[in-house]
Amino acid sequence: MIPSATFLRRRHLVALPLAALTVPLARPALAAFPDRPVIIVVPFPPGGGVDAAARAIADGMAADLGAAVQVDNRPGGTSSIGAGFVARSAPDGHTLLIGTTSLSINPVMQPSLPPGDPRTAFAPVGQVLEVPYMLTAGPTAPPGDLAALIAWSRANPGRLDFANGGSGSGQRMAASLLAHRAGIEVNHVPYRGTAPAVIDLAAGRVQTIFAQPIEVAPVLQAGTARAVAVSTATRSPAFPDIPAVAEMLPGFNVGSWSGLFAPAATPDAVLDRLNAALNAAIRNEAMRARFRAEGAEFVGGTRAAFAELLDREIRGWMELQRATGLTID
């Protein structure tokens, strides 16, 4: 009978001198990970884009990790409830957050919200998605392209309405950055969510909005609104005929992103393992094509690149806040 690996290890340990037994085993965190299901906390209700992204990567990560990956929705508090829960969780890699752009905005606009500064509360695992905001104009907006909208707004200060899904949202920040870069004064109109804002846009009660492509797709298809520009640095592969704001305002680059975070102090070996599983999951071409049709691109990449994105965005929003006095309405 072949001795088991456990039996052989025990015999080996018995034969070791006592001093050798004090040497720690190599990479204990990675050897024990994962030893139970991994939970991805979504800080939003089921059914939205972030929830869909979390569920899309869960199966692929599970296959790579050899353990179940489950989604747990914990909405509320501008995503702070779910984020705070993960920040307080054990730093062992079994509880993750799929965080969004709000993690770079809240520390600037609502610093009292948990978990505070995400750069110290979390360890970045990797970016999941990047989605452009689409500048969309309703039937009462001035006609023409982005240059025409800006020219009209300069001639009519404060009369161009920009709806948004909340005064601390990425949509509001994108509109504020556009106004600052273009040197115009606009009227921000906050709503409790993007859906009612888009309804009012199509009805002509507000003029423009920055929103994700999937959020404005129904009104674009119905012909009750028109796409003016996308907010990312280059044109979206899904909408190559729609210009980027950066073509008129060089360097303009705002988007909605999502990514995985673990609690701070999670061992590097565990973070590396999670990053590898994430990158393996997003190589699924059928999944990529499905999300690309809605304007969303899977990103992946290194932990360091994602940490740099988070830090760059926080510093950028701080600069905008200092320059404009931007506050929550």
Image (cartoon, helix red, strand yellow):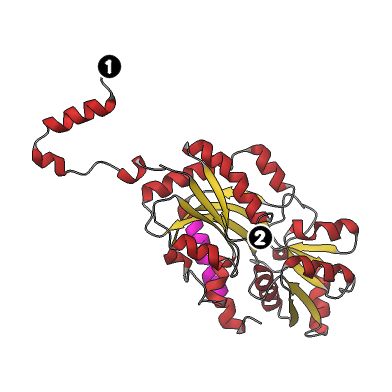
User: Which is nearer the N-term, disc 1 or disc 2?
Assistant: 1
Q: Secondary structure at mark 2?
A: loop
The residue most toward the top is 1
Where residue 298 sits in the image (x, y, percent)?
62, 48
Q: Nearer the viewer, mark 1 or mark 2?
A: 1
Magenta region, main secondary structure: helix
Where residue 84 sits in the image (x, y, percent)?
49, 65
Where residue 136 sits in the image (x, y, percent)?
80, 65
**Residue sitting at x 62%, y 38%:** 284
Extent of the magenta region: 306-318
**Residue sitting at x 51%, y 76%:** 111
**Residue 184 appears in the figure:** yes
User: In the picture shown, does residue 285 fall above or below 238?
Assistant: above
Can residue 252 be found in the magenta stretch? no
User: In the picture shown, does residue 123 fall above or below 168?
Assistant: above
Hey, which quadrant is residue 89 in on the image?
bottom left
Per the image, the residue denoted by label 1 is 2
| Towards the viewer: 263 or 47 | 47
Neighbor class of circle 1 (other Cα within 10 Å; few <14, some 14-19, many 20+) is few
**Residue 143 appears in the figure:** no
Q: Amino acid at mark 2?
A: Ala
| Numbered-mark total | 2
Quadrant (top left/top right/bottom left/bottom right) for the N terminus? top left
**In the visual, does 33 lie left or right of 190?**
left
**Residue sitting at x 89%, y 74%:** 140
Q: Secondary structure at mark 1?
A: loop
Quadrant (top left/top right/bottom left/bottom right) for the C terminus? bottom right
Disc assigned to residue 233: 2
Q: Amino acid at mark 1?
A: Ile
